[in-house]
């Protein structure tokens, strides 16, 4: 599932330049399962939480465990933990750390140090207490942002247009897989019944893996992630959660941390998470990351005019947006299963087959927000939110 990109195994003769030879994807994707080929592992894959619990209850003698979370070259989350002497009051109190970038596709072996700069702090729902999760972005040894660090430019865009007060809400869809990589709960030698009863379904045979979903929901709430809801999706074993509303850079930060938490929770159930936009080929809905968006002008009375103006700008840059709206999105945007074709741009009121949907309630109120239905489930939210703000608030 993970599309690894090759990069040179050796440095240039001098070996002293900070060089990244792999090509940054267009788009950046997030399509992985947090596992180590579970189907081939001989050891148990489930966490022994009952045994672990007695150790998690041991006092930490005033120390704090800080788990640094970052995004690697393959758009997967990585994490490592350090011990702090006291609980930090803000990210400014946290140290800059480093890791072996040659093992994550972010540097070469002869100049492998990549540096982690803390961006946001969340509570740790696994270790609890004063322990924390630290979202960090990546920098090279010369202080420049690593080529995988899309947050750096997103911060610039959000700062440039901060006066517009952009808000986002993202609907993250994903698919649960079993240890062998098949959709969780599906028959081993066949297929479940056709789509219909699964969307917001209740009951055995209609939903699969609810325990993972509920555990993730609670973990996000505890951590401080701005999760706002969950529901079963149209295809069996497919789920969705919503994050937002978030302002500016918060959207990318909270979505990435929610993804980390989802994969981390799924570890304990022996379940893989797929963010591929078309995990199941055939007559099954794909997975998206519908992005709801507004500016202050759109939210104010009469904001429908600003909404229409923004949509007109989006139409002009359709291809530029598609380029960063997710890898393999062409498998999902086919003009069927509640999508418009990837080559076309359209909008409409309450139209889930359009590129842009204006909710009926927004049309009636003549102000509010709109939904961009094009982004795939494996998007880099920093790229998506920044291009939406750049297009709608800039002079296009």
Image: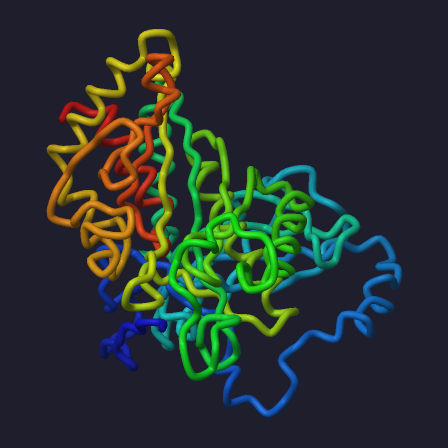
Decide: is 75 above or below 48: above
How many numbered callouts? 0
Q: Quadrant of residue 189?
A: bottom left
Which quadrant, please, contains the N terminus? bottom left
In the visual, does 382 lie left or right of 81? left
- Examine the rendered structure and indicate whether residue 315 appears above or below residue 294: below
In the image, residue 344 lies at what x, y percent?
12, 43
Q: Which one is nearer the viewer's eye here, 19 or 60?
A: 60
Instruction: Tell me which residue sits at (11%, 48%) in the image.
Output: 343
Where residue 252 appears, as percent x and y from the top left, is 43, 43
- 173 lies above or below 225: below
* Residue 330 appears in the picture as rendered: yes
Asked if 150 appears above or below 208 in the picture, the reply is: above
**Image coordinates for residue 183, horizontal then vertical, percent:** 45, 71
In front: 203, or 370?
A: 203
Q: Is residue 346 left or right of residue 372?
A: left
Q: Which quadrant of the figure contains the C terminus? A: top left
Q: Residue 227 in the image: state x and y as whole percent.
A: 56, 41
Q: Is residue 145 visible?
A: no
* Color encoding of the figure: rainbow
Which residue is rendered at x = 33% and y = 12% of the image?
366
Residue extending farthest top? 301
Q: Residue at position x 56%, y 37% from top? A: 228
Query: What's the residue at 48%, 57% (across, down)?
Result: 70
């Amino acid at each position: 599932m993970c599309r690894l990109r090759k990069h040179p195994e050796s440095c240039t003769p001098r070996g002293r330049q900070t060089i990244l030879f792999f090509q940054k994807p267009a788009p950046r994707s997030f399509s992985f399962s947090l596992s180590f080929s579970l189907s081939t592992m001989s050891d148990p894959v489930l966490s022994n939480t009952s045994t672990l619990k007695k150790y998690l209850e041991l006092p930490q003698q005033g120390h704090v465990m800080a788990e640094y979370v970052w995004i690697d070259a393959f758009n997967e989350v990585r994490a490592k933990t350090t011990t702090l002497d006291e609980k930090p009051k803000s990210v400014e109190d946290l140290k800059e750390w480093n890791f072996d970038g040659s093992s994550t596709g972010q540097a070469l072996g002869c100049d492998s140090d990549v540096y982690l700069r803390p961006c946001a702090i969340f509570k740790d729902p696994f270790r609890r207490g004063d322990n924390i999760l630290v979202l960090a972005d990546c920098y090279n040894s010369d202080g420049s942002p690593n080529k995988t660090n899309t947050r750096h430019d997103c911060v610039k865009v959000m700062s440039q247009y901060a006066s517009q007060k952009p808000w986002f809400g993202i609907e993250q869809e994903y698919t649960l897989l079993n240890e062998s990589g098949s959709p969780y709960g599906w028959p081993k030698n066949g297929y479940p019944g056709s789509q219909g009863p699964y969307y917001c379904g209740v009951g055995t045979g209609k939903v699969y893996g609810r325990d993972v979903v509920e555990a993730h929901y609670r973990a996000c709430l505890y951590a401080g992630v701005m999760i706002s809801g969950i529901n079963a999706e149209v295809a069996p074993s497919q789920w969705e959660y919503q994050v937002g509303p978030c302002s500016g850079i918060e959207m990318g930060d909270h979505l990435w941390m929610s993804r980390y938490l989802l994969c981390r929770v799924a570890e304990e159930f022996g379940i893989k998470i797929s963010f591929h936009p078309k995990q199941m080929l055939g007559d099954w809905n794909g997975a998206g990351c519908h992005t709801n968006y507004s500016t202050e002008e759109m939210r104010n009375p009469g904001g429908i005019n600003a909404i229409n103006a923004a949509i007109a700008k989006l139409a002009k840059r359709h291809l530029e947006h598609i380029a960063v709206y997710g890898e393999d999105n062409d498998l999902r945007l086919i003009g069927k299963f509640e999508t418009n074709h990837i080559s076309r741009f359209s909008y409409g009121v309450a139209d889930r087959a359009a590129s842009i949907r204006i909710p009926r309630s927004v049309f009636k109120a003549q102000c509010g927000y709109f939904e961009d239905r094009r982004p795939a489930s494996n998007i880099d939210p920093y790229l998506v939110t920044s291009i939406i703000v750049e297009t709608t608030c800039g002079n296009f």
